[in-house]
Image (tube, grey):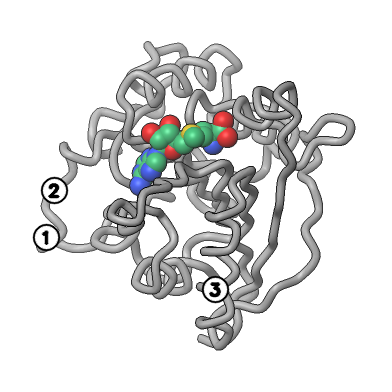
Amino acid sequence: MSAGISRRRGLDPGDWVVALDELPAPEQGRIDPRSWFEHPDRPLEFEIGSGKGTFLVQQARLQRETNFLGAEWAAAYARHAADRARRHGLENVRMLHGNAVEFISHWCPDGIIDVLHLYFSDPWPKKRHHKRRVVQDESLVQFHRLLRGNGQFRIVTDHIDLWHWYEEHMERNASMFERCEYEPPASAGEGEFVGTNFERKFRIEGRSFNAMTLRKVGD
Ligand SMILES: C[S@@+](CC[C@H](N)C(=O)[O-])C[C@H]1O[C@@H](n2cnc3c(N)ncnc32)[C@H](O)[C@@H]1O
């Protein structure tokens, strides 16, 4: 297994993390993250911006036959999420420490992900920072490539301007993704959209949320 990840059980939290900056350069070929799991043949779901890993850990405990890869560029959060997964004995969870969009664009093979999750992504409200948002026309091409046929891309946000950004991007890219009904995951609590740390914090503040599920269309 690459980048310090071991298949052995009971290791320290670092063994649940792959560091993007320790991977071979992308010129040396694609890297398939399915090989980082004990059962590489199982379906793989990928969460961009996992924070402390609440969604990953909650959902992976209910869906043991599915592998979950979280990506988080903040080192402390990536370690925290990995440590939680280790303490729960979740061999179906791994964390990537690094920029998820870079990893997807430059390292990931085509058609390996069943579901892509993006929950409460940073809104980058200033216009000059919009280019830092995860969803861009260019990143949607990569997400489309990453997903298997009929794969899903699931988004939840509290931020109305970011929501409009998502809607505009999806309208412009309707040949790649079709909208379908959003249903909360099994791990969501009563009345929750997904049940992440940010959702729980924002609910206490009385914020409202929007959600969409997109289905990959075309090859
Ligand atoms: C607002 S927090 C939400 C965390 C979690 N999804 C939740 O709902 O509680 C967004 C997280 O995404 C991470 N993030 C943003 N862009 C990222 C990227 N391109 N790759 C990896 N992590 C990213 C940030 O470091 C941050 O921890």
Figure quadrant of residue 5? top left
Q: Contact (CB < 8 A) between labels 1 and 2?
A: yes
Mark carried by residue 168:
3
Callout 3 secondary element:
helix
Give neighbour class at mark 1: few <14, some 14-19, many 20+ (Cα, 10 Å): few
The three-letter code of the residue at mark 2 reads: Pro
From the viewer's side, name the closer residue of 150 and 132: 132
Which of disc 3 and disc 1 is earlier in sequence? 1
The three-letter code of the residue at mark 3 reads: Glu
Q: Nearer the viewer, mark 2 or mark 3?
A: 3
Residue 126 visible in the current orientation: yes
The three-letter code of the residue at mark 1 reads: Gln
Query: In whole angstroms, how far apart are the C-alphas of marks 2 and 3?
Result: 36 Å
Residue at numbered disc 2: 24
**In percent of the image, x 87 and y 35: which residue is there?**
191
Label 1 C-beta lies within 8 Å of the nearest ligand 1 atom: no
The quadrant of the picture occupied by the N terminus is top left
Residue at numbered disc 1: 28
**In percent of the image, x 33 and y 28: which residue is there?**
74
Image-based side of 18 in relation to 86, left or right: left
Can you say whether 166 is above or below 22 in the image? below
